[in-house]
Image (cartoon, rainbow, N blue to C red):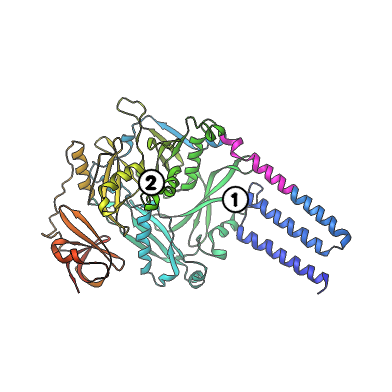
Amino acid sequence: MSKKVSSSVITILLACLCVAVYYLALPALTIRSAGLWWFALLCLFCVTVSITCFCDQDHERVIEEVGSTIMVAVLVIFCVCGLISGMIFHSGKAQQVADVTVSENKIVDVFTDITAEESFNNLPLVDLDTAQMLGDKKVAQLKHASWYDVDDEYNLIQYQGKYYRLSVIDYGGYWKYRKAKHDGLPGYVLVSATSKNGVVTQEATVIQLDEAIRYSPGAFWSFDLRRHLRSQYPSYIFDESYLEIDESATPYWITGVLRPTAGVFGVKTVTSFIVTNAQTGESQEYSIDDAPEWIDHIFSLKYLMEITEWHYAYIEGYWNNVFSKTNVWRTSYYFRDKHKNDSDSAAGKFANFFGYSSIIQNDQVMLYTGLTAANKADSNLGWLIIDTSSGKITEYQFKDENGRNASGAEESSAQAAVEQLVQAMGYEATFPLPVNIAGEPSYIMCLKGKAGLIQAYAICNINNFSIAVQAETLDKALNLYLDKLGKDAVYDTDVTEDADDDGQNPEAEVLEITGKVVEIYTAEVNGTTQFYYVIGNELYRSSIKLNELQVTWKVGDELTVTFYEDGALRVVTDIKKN
C-alpha cells in the first residue's frame, strides 16, 4: 500500500473518530461548555496526525511542532479558564444564587396538621423504594414485558387533584430497543402516593397510551432525548430531564437550561427550561415565570440541592468552608452518603436515609430537607421547604417555646428510634415526613418489611425522639401518639361496619391459589399473631386463628390459600398445608 493511500485511510478513520465522538458526547457548541474544549483538542490532534501523514520528512517535524504548540496552547487556555471559573474565586456569587427567605413563622405552623379531617390524604407516604418495587411488578402486565424496564425516577406529581409518583416505562437496553423501537414505549406508571382511610393503598397503575412515547433518555440514535434536544438547541447546556404529564395525561420531558454565570464555566444556573412532547418530539422553551401551571418540577432535585449547599457552605467565603466552618450549615441531603458508607449501613440500618422527602404544601409539590450543623451533630437546627416550580427556598429555624434557637431530632435518629420498636420484626423506617400533631412538631414514617411492602406506621416526636409509637394503621398510630402526649384521641379506630367477625370484607372477591412459600414473617397485631407469607411475588397475611399449625410451617412448604385482595396485601381467609 502506497503512503498516499495509507495516509488517506488514516485521515478517514480519524475523521470518523471525531464524528463518532461528537455524536456520542454531544458537547454544546459554546466556548462555555468544557465538553466542547475537549472535543476541540481531539480534533486538533486528529488534524495534526492527518496532515503529518501527507507530508514528507522535511515538513513532518514542522507540522508536529506547530500542531503540538497549538494543542498545548489550547490546553493551557482551557486550564486557565477552568481555574478562573473555580469556586475559590466565585464562592460569593454562588452563595447568592439560591433565593432563600428566613421565615419568622414557627415550623410547626407550616407542617401539615394531621389532626384535621382528611389530612392524611395530603401525606405522600409512598417513598421512592416502595414506588420502584410496585412499578416493577406492574410491567409484567405489558405485552412483550421483557423488552421494558421502569425508570427509577418516580417524582411526586399532582394529577387531576390527586398525588402520584410518576415514572416512564423505558427500554431494557440496546438489544431490547431494537425489538421494541417500532412499537415505541407503551406509556408510564402512576403509583398512588397518599393514603385512603388511614392506610396507604400501595396501588400502581400502568397507563398505556394510544400514541406511543418515541423520545426518552433510554432510546437510541435519533430518538435519544438528549440527542434530539441537541439537534434543536445546539449551543445549550442541559440539566437533567424528567417526565411530567399534563391534565390530559400527555407525557412531556422537562429539561432545565444551564448557563454559566462566573468565569467561563463556573456557577451554572437554570435560567429557562424546555418542554418536549415525549410522543411527537415537539419542544418549546419557557422562562421560569411563564411556566405552565401543570408542571410541578421545573428544577431538578440535584440542582436545587446544589445551590442550597452553596448558600449555606459559602456564608462566610470559600476558605471558611474548608477550615473553620464558622456559621456553616449542611442539609440532611448532604449527609445522605454518610449513612450509606458507615458501618451501620452494612446491616441496612440507614438503607432508607434519602436526606430529603417530597411533601405537599398549599396544594403544591415541595421538597423538604433538614438543616444540620457542619460538625455533623445529630440534630436539626432548622428545616427547608423548597418550591420545585419556582426554586424559592424558605428556611424555618427551630426555636423553643420562648423563641430561642434550639434543635430537634435529626431524621436518621428518628428512624432508628422507631425501628427499635419493631426490632423483632426487622422492619425498616422510611425517610421521615415532618407534620404538626396537636401543636407538636413530629415525624411520621412507614415501616416496611423485608418484602418491601408497608406493614405499619410510626410517629416520633421531633423535640424528644424517645416519644415514639407504631401501629398497623395511621389513625391508630396517631391515637397512640396523642395518648403519649396526654391529649385526646381524634379518630375512631373500631372495626368498620362492613367487616365480619374475622375482619373480612364481605364484598371482596375471594380467590384461591396453591404455591410454595418463599419467605415467612410474623408480627403481633392487636394481641394476635399474624403470619406474612411470600408466595410467588405476592404477600399474604394470615391470622394464627385460621390454623394453629402455622407455627410449624417453613420456607419451601406448599400451601393452598383462600384470600381476598386489600390493596397490595392479600388477606387470607383459609389456609392449609398440602
Residue 465: name its quadrant.
Answer: top left
Between discs 2 and 1, the one toward the N terminus? 1
Q: Estimate the x, y position of residue 162 in percent, counting from the top left.
A: 32, 52
Note whether 235 is above or below 532 in the view shown. Answer: above
Quarter of the picture containing the N terminus is bottom right
Q: Residue at x 50, y 45 (%)?
A: 303
- Residue 206 locus on image (x, y percent): 36, 63
Q: Amino acid at mark 1?
A: Tyr
* The one of 282 and 505 positioned closer to us in this rendering: 505
Does residue 298 appear in the picture of this structure? Answer: no
Secondary element under disc 2, as helix, strand or loop, is: strand
Residue 236, disc: 1
Q: Is residue 339 magenta?
A: no
Where disc 1 sits, the SS reads: loop
Label 2 – label 1 distance at C-alpha:
30 Å
Residue type, mark 2 in image: Ser
Most frequent secondary structure within the magenta stretch: helix
Q: Position of residue 72 (x, y in %)?
A: 75, 49
Residue of label 2: 357
Q: Residue at x 71, y 67 (%)?
A: 13
Mark 1, Cα crowd under 10 Å, few <14 / some 14-19 / many 20+, is: some
Q: Is residue 519 left or right of residue 488?
A: right
Q: Nearer the viewer, mark 2 or mark 1?
A: 2
Q: Residue furthest right?
A: 58
Region in magenta: 73-91
Q: Quadrant of residue 168?
A: bottom left
Task: Estimate the x, y position of residue 563 in percent, counting from the top left.
Answer: 20, 66
Residue 228 located left or right of residue 516? right
Label 2 CA crowd tier, 10 Å (few <14, some 14–19, many 20+): many
Residue 259 seen in the current view: yes
